[in-house]
Image (spheres, rainbow, N blue to C red):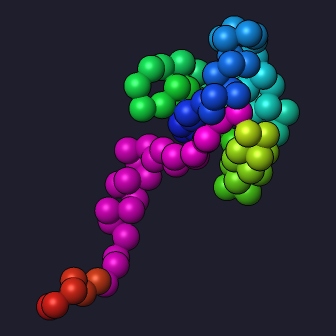
């Protein structure tokens, strides 16, 4: 998932171009990198945009994040989402850990 907050420059562009046009830019960016957008929502509050998508790998996700943040219109963060089955696999993985002070 991509969580983004527009900069002053970015919000001005959004106001000028509109949400539909910006959503298409985001969709094209992700699809041109081999990914697929599952959902895209604008919001108000702490963050302005949420995009749930699949991309081929972490390197692709990092490249998208670098390109978007370097353009200066948004502060974007990639938040990896895990399926319930992935959590099941993680919970079943043997891990040895000693808590501090124990």
Magenta residue check for 2: no
**What residue is drawn where x is 44% and y is 52%?**
86
Q: Is residue 68 visible?
A: no
Q: Is residue 90 above or below residue 54?
A: below
**What residue is drawn where x is 85% and y is 33%?**
32
Residue 58 in the image: x percent, y percent?
Answer: 67, 55
Q: In the displayed image of the protein, which residue is found farthest to the left?
A: 102
Query: Where does the C terminus fall, quadrant-wise?
Result: bottom left
Q: Viewed as shown, does residue 86 lie left or right of 3?
A: left
Residue 8 in the image: x percent, y percent?
Answer: 63, 28
Residue 25 in the image: x percent, y percent?
Answer: 78, 22
Query: Where does the N terminus fall, quadrant-wise?
Result: top right
Q: Viewed as shown, does residue 71 lie left or right of 80?
A: right
Q: Is residue 90 above or below residue 94?
A: above
Q: Which residues are magenta?
A: 73-96
Q: In the displayed image of the protein, which residue is found farthest to the right?
A: 32
């Amino acid at each position: 998932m991509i969580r983004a907050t527009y900069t002053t420059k970015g919000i001005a562009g959004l106001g000028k171009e509109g949400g539909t046009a910006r959503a298409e830019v985001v969709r094209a960016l992700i699809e041109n990198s081999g990914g697929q957008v599952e959902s895209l929502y604008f919001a108000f509050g702490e963050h302005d945009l949420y995009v749930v998508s699949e991309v081929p790998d972490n390197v692709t996700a990092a490249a998208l994040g670098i390109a978007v943040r370097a353009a200066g219109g948004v502060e974007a963060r990639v938040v990896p989402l895990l399926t319930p089955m992935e959590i099941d696999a993680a919970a079943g993985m043997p891990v040895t850990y000693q808590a501090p002070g124990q």
